[in-house]
Amino acid sequence: MSITDYHFLTDTCSVDPFSTFGAFGAITYSTASRTTHYCRVEYRQHQVRTPDGRTEVASMTVYVGGQTTGGSPPTLTIRDRLVLSTQAVPNSTSAIPLILAVDRTPDQAGILHHVAVHCG
């Protein structure tokens, strides 16, 4: 994918992959493996089904595309951390939304094009 394939993704975000659970059950993330991606944030309340089968109300959807340095979209899970830039979230230094569900969208050839992350 070239940068022009992501022309509708006007903001940036960082993805920190899930690393492990700490001694007291706190989640730790691999900030050394952090990647920066093009994204678009849309604020709209909608229902989503979480991986454990519950129905939750998401307040935003973050569409995450390829890396800003070139490359494919991330393989996000609900355990990963998504850090939105100040461009994506006005009046904030950064935002870390709660990930409720993740949808993967392929292109015409069946290759992953972007990931829709539904956040609460």
Image (tube, grey):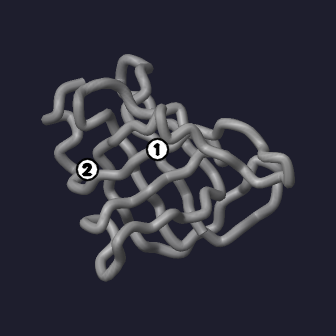
| Residue type, numbered disc 1 | Val
* Residue found at x 51% / y 63%: 96
Along the viewing direction, whichever of 55 and 38 lies nearer the viewer: 38
Q: Looking at the picture, how far across and down is residue 34, in whole percent?
A: 44, 38
Q: Is residue 2 left or right of residue 59?
A: left
Q: Are marks 2 and 1 in contact (CB under 8 Å)?
A: no
Q: Looking at the picture, how far across and down is residue 104, in whole percent?
A: 52, 37
- Looking at the picture, does residue 30 appear above or below residue 28? above
Q: Looking at the picture, how far across and down is residue 109, in whole percent?
A: 37, 17
- Looking at the picture, does residue 104 appear above or below residue 38? above
Q: Which mark is residue 9?
A: 2
- Give the mark nearer the N terminus: 2 vs 1: 2
Spatial CA span between label 2 and label 1: 15 Å
Which residue corresponds to mark 1? 15
Nearest to viewer (mark 2 / mark 1): 1
| Residue type, numbered disc 2 | Leu
Q: Looking at the picture, how far across and down is residue 29, in whole percent?
A: 60, 43
* Residue found at x 35% / y 24%: 108
Report how many numbered discs are placed on residues in the image.
2
Q: Is residue 102 left or right of residue 37?
A: right
The residue at the far bottom in this view is: 91
